[in-house]
Image (cartoon, rainbow, N blue to C red):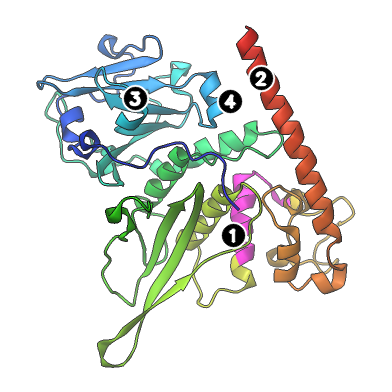
Amino acid sequence: MSTEKLYINPENTTQNMSSYQNYFKGTKQLKDNFFDKDLKIESNVRVFKSDEKDCGYDEIFLNEDSEIFGGISNQISFLYPHNIRGYQNRIGFRYYKEKPLSLQNNIPYFTLIKCGFRKFIILEKDSEIKDINSNTFIIQDLDCFNIIISIIKAKIRKDDHYLTYPNSLIEILGFIYACKYSERGINNIQILHPFIPSPFQKESLIEEETDIDSSKYYIEPIIYNKHISLLFFYYKQKRNNYYLRKNILNNIQIGSSCSMWFYASLLFLIQEKIEIPFNNNALYKIIEKLYDLFNIVEKDITNNKIINKNSDNIVKDEFVSYKLAFKTFIDVDNILDQFNLIKIIGPGALGEYQKVFLELKNNINILKLNNKYYEKIFN
């Protein structure tokens, strides 16, 4: 049930606790300045100097090795204080709709920066600092959601074996905060900062405080032990102004796939009308979100033998695409049981085939990854 690649260290050093203003104020904006000579990329580094003393930051771009062995999209860059490197010193990330080293002007992007203990903001949506020309970094028409979805879909397209899902914490954080700032929601939803508990830090064990509003739904992403899930809760008013918190968790995944279910579940919650309690229709809606992420179109939802779904008694809203049925993130036995199909098909058979398939695909994937590694070593 856990993901294999959660690469960013969520801990904050004293330096990370410093205000992001110390790095960004007085610097040039990247927007409309992609080919500015002062922002030229050299050795995969772009330097943003500041007219303020001891300010500025460096943007580090990933190479092919980082994507192959680190599992992080090369459409994402890392941000560090100027001339300071080190895993623990990252101050944020920048997400590009296209490859940033493709030398195209004005690629849509957004910047996720640390603003406190395990909290982030999007610079172009929620900052008050001024750039070198005394302008804010706010970009009103910026669609952060569209950018991160493009990154996730691009990574899925590259994965021929569907084993290395876009599950680095860097992409997950970008997705969470893009959803927080998205205007696509139709429900009264409040997305909280991710809950990232650590047994060695007391402050990390405290959830973000929320208002008590029985008209709202709350979503809390939970990141722990290389696993991402979400807690959906709401408050139900009782007598004497007493409120009861109702928590709902999900358990329909298999293998290192929690990021895929997290993406689809969060998309469902912010884009579809919610009905409590959840039923099988909610799961169908989540699977439809997976259709979109994997670019599965209407014609792929049936096989060649099915000419007309209506005549074959197949209802679109209650049919799982064959394109998804044996993906490496779907627990076949659990899905059949969820939809009461286990009685029709019989227990265990599909699940046993899936286990063999997953083991073989995983071994092949490891062999190919090792082959790439030794190619790099000997070259």
Which residue lies under the disc numbered 1?
A: 286
Asked if the magenta segment contains residue 15, the reply would be: no
For the record, the magenta segment spans 283-299
Instruction: Answer few, some or many: residues within 10 Å of disc 3's Cα (few below 14, many 20 plus, some between 14 and 19).
Output: few
* Rendered residue at 61%/48% (across/down): 257
Of the pair 137 and 197, the residue shown nearer to us: 197
* Rendered residue at 43%/15% (across/down): 103
Give the amino acid type for the residue marked by disc 3 in the picture.
Gly
Viewer-nearest of labels 1 and 2?
Answer: 2
Q: Considering only vertical position in the picture, is 146 above or below 209? A: above
Q: Does dot 3 land on a helix, a strand or a loop?
A: loop
Viewer-nearest of labels 3 and 4?
Answer: 3
Which residue lies under the disc numbered 3?
A: 86
Which is the main secondary structure of the residues drawn in magenta? helix
Q: Does dot 1 land on a helix, a strand or a loop?
A: helix
Which residue lies under the disc numbered 2?
A: 372
Dots 2 and 4: beta carbons under 8 Å?
yes
Instruction: Give how far across and how far down residue 30 sits, in percent.
Output: 29, 24
Give the amino acid type for the residue marked by disc 1 in the picture.
Ile
Instruction: Give how far across and how far down residue 314 sits, in percent.
Output: 79, 66
Q: Is residue 92 visible?
A: yes
